[in-house]
Amino acid sequence: MKRITATDALILSIPERIQLVEDIWDTIANEPESIELTAEEKKIIDERLEAYHKNPDLGSPWEDVYKRIAAKG
């Protein structure tokens, strides 16, 4: 397998680079068990989960958040 460098990627068009990043991300997402969270990241997740359990109505569904963001654009 030929290794590519950042310089090789810069030769690609923007859409090609976006596709490359998506392809790379897909290979990472296919192996979520390989991603190790730091102790700080785990702490943040636990705190947010605890806050959600204390008041599940406080947050907003992703669809609503996305609509608010998109409406500002």
Image: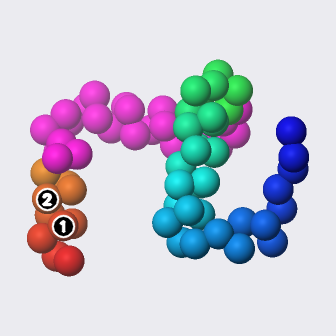
**Mark 1: few, some, or many residues within 10 Å (few <14, many ≥20)?**
few
The amino acid type found where label 1 is placed reads: Ala
- 55 in magenta: yes
Residue 71 higher or lower than 43, as above or below: below
Provide the residue span drawn in magenta: 36-63
Task: Please give the name of the residue rendered at 54% of the width and 72% of the height, measured from the top-left corner.
Answer: 14
Residue 53 included in the magenta stretch of the image: yes
Answer yes or no: is residue 9 visible.
yes
Q: Where on the picture, by quarter, is residue 32?
A: top right
Q: Position of residue 21 (x, y in %)?
A: 59, 54
Magenta span dominant secondary structure: helix
Q: Position of residue 59 (x, y in %)?
A: 20, 45
The location of residue 43, given as percent across then percent down, is 57, 38
Distance from the alpha carbon under mark 1 to that under mark 2: 5 Å
Does residue 3 appear left or right of residue 37 in this picture?
right
Q: Secondary structure at mark 1?
A: helix
Disc 1: which residue: 70
Residue under label 2, please give it.
67
Mark 2: which amino acid? Lys
